[in-house]
């Protein structure tokens, strides 16, 4: 099979759900019972002799119900992908990204936001996984080795060219490459700083918070994060507990997950200021650019961070234009994939705002580390005030899980985007037919039957009496 003949032969999708809500892992003020889920896509490739080529894996993250809707959105993109030349796709993933966002009918469902845009992100990221595998490089390195001109050709400047032109971007990337060889060596040796949210979920007891915060410091993390926003008295108590455990030198970020109106956000953050929070994350709606700007003005020197629910580069542009954020939080699987995240990293670099990615969920740490590492090596050029979120959930389900040492993400070495989930995990947690869910549904049915039988017996006894 000549590789030039290879084409995408199938776009396979999976609705994968993990029962995380049963442990209150991941609970916050807006999301009390998440079942961490992946709408997962595999691009299969092959040539005329039907030999299997490498696969591209991608996904978007959801928290349970609706993951089937997300999968259906990915399937709606299938006609754009099946039959395409693998060589052409990998040489220019941006061509597919533009075709997907430009679909003249599907575009009505956005444009460039929501379920359809997340589906595009999953497919585009799967292409980048395939491209990095074929180049025999981890994605961060493929990006860092690429020429500024090629990278800029991957970016859609539509709607952002008023603040970032292709010429600006070329300039930023050329400057970003100065000293990149030294930074690559440093990255391979020392990794990239992380921070941990594991101690701070809202459903955890003070005892568990204390134990996990102490553990985080012992593990080498220099920043932790607490969920806030459900009850002020609780938050004051939990922040006091956490500050007492970690001491004055460890940064404590707080995260309200969009719980507040603008005035509440200001009042509540001020009420927690005595515990020296480093940033307040998602104080209000991710769409409220001017609201974020008002909060930032009112709560300084507490920083304002947002981005995990920011739907596209255009909203990020406005957050930066409005001086609404101190910390920009990209998410690898919410916007339209690597191409759009390149645009967002370039916007952040232009405004000099540090990027501290959102991660956790399922597989988000695995993906987003590549983008931060590229940013460090070949764009922003520094790790100062930059940290990648880390949550120690569900990594075992991936073939190339993140490696954390001394509170830092070690650079991935395997080719690809670290997106490939273990086949046995897919078989177990596919909803509703995988082995875990099938057994779980059967158990629920049995329990319901037993309850009904007991109720009936009780009624019969009462009638007999
Ligand atoms: Mg958050």
Image: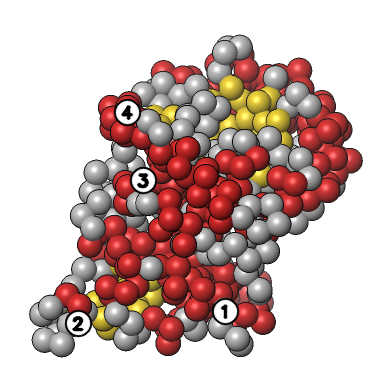
Residue 62 in view (yes/no): no
Question: In front here: 156 or 269?
Answer: 156
Which mark is first along the chain, 2 or 4? Answer: 2
Labels 3 and 4: the sequence-earlier one: 3
Q: First in sequence, mark 1 or 4: give its number.
A: 1
Q: Quadrant of the N terminus?
A: bottom left
Residue at position x 36%, y 24% in the image: 406
Task: Using the image, tell me which numbered label, if any, was put on residue 144.
Answer: 3
Q: Position of residue 211 (x, y in %)?
A: 49, 23
Tell me whether circle 4 and circle 2 mark residues in contact (CB < 8 Å).
Answer: no
Mark 2 burial class by Cα count in 10 Å: few <14, some 14-19, many 20+: some
- Residue most extreme to the right: 263
Residue for badge 4: 182
Q: CA distance from mark 2 to mark 3?
A: 28 Å
Label 1 vs 3, first from the N-terminus: 1
Question: Which of marks 1 and 2 precedes in the sequence?
Answer: 2
Q: Nearer the viewer, mark 1 or mark 4?
A: 4
Q: Which residue is mark 1?
A: 102
Residue 412 in the figure: left or right of residue 105: left
Q: Residues within 10 Å of mark 4 (few under 14, many from 20)?
A: few
Location of the C terminus by quadrant is: bottom right
Q: Identify the residue at horizontal 75%, vertical 56% (top origin).
A: 287
Marks 1 and 4 close (CB-CB < 8 Å): no
Q: For the residues marked 4 and 2, what is the alpha-carbon distance in whole angstroms?
A: 39 Å
* Label 4 secondary element: helix
Where 439 sits versus 295, above or below? Answer: below
Mark 1 to mark 4 CA distance (whole Å): 40 Å
Mark 1 vs ligand 1: CB below 8 Å? no
- In the displayed structure, 212 sits above or below 350; it is above
User: Mark 3 CB in 8 Å range of ligand 1?
Assistant: no
Q: Are marks 1 and 3 in contact (CB under 8 Å)?
A: no
């Amino acid at each position: 099979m000549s590789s030039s003949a290879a084409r995408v032969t199938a776009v396979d999708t999976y609705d994968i759900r993990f029962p995380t809500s049963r442990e209150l892992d991941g609970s916050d003020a807006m999301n009390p019972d998440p079942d961490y889920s992946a709408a997962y896509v595999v691009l299969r490739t092959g040539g005329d002799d039907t030999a299997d080529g490498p696969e591209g894996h991608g996904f978007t993250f959801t928290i349970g119900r609706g993951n089937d809707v997300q999968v259906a959105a990915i399937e709606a993109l299938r006609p754009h992908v099946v039959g395409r030349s693998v060589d052409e796709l990998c040489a220019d993933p941006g061509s597919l990204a533009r075709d997907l966002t430009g679909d003249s009918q599907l575009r009505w469902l956005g444009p460039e936001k929501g379920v359809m845009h997340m589906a595009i992100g999953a497919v585009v990221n799967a292409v980048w996984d395939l491209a990095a595998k074929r180049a025999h490089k981890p994605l961060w390195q493929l990006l860092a080795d690429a020429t500024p001109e090629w990278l800029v050709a991957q970016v859609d400047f539509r709607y952002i060219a008023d603040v970032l032109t292709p010429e600006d971007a070329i300039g930023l990337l050329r400057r970003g490459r100065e000293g990149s060889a030294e930074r690559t060596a440093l990255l391979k040796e020392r990794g990239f700083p992380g921070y941990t949210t594991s101690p701070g979920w809202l459903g955890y007891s003070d005892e568990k918070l204390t134990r996990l915060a102490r553990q985080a410091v012992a593990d080498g993390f220099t920043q932790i994060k607490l969920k806030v926003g459900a009850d002020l008295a609780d938050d004051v108590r939990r922040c006091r507990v956490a500050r007492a455990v970690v001491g004055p030198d460890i940064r404590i970020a707080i995260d309200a997950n969009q719980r507040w109106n603008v005035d509440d956000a200001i009042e509540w953050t001020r009420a927690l200021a005595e515990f020296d929070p480093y940033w307040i994350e998602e104080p209000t709606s991710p769409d409220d650019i001017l609201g974020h700007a008002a909060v930032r003005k009112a709560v300084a020197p507490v920083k304002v961070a947002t981005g995990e629910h920011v739907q596209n580069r255009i909203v990020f542009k406005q957050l930066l234009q409005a001086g609404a954020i101190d910390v920009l939080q990209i998410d690898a699987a919410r916007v339209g994939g690597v191409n759009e995240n390149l645009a967002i990293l370039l916007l952040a670099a232009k405004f000099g705002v540090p990027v501290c990615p959102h991660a956790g969920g399922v597989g988000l740490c695995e993906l987003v580390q590549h983008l931060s590492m590229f940013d460090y090596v070949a764009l922003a050029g520094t790790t100062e005030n930059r940290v990648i979120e880390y949550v120690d959930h569900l990594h075992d389900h991936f073939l190339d899980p993140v490696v954390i040492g001394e509170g830092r993400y070690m650079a991935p070495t395997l080719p690809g985007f670290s997106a490939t989930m273990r086949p046995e995990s897919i078989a177990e947690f596919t909803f509703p037919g995988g082995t875990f869910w099938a057994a779980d549904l059967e158990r629920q049915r049995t329990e319901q039957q037993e309850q009904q039988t007991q109720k009936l017996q009780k009624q019969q006894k009462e009638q007999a009496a």
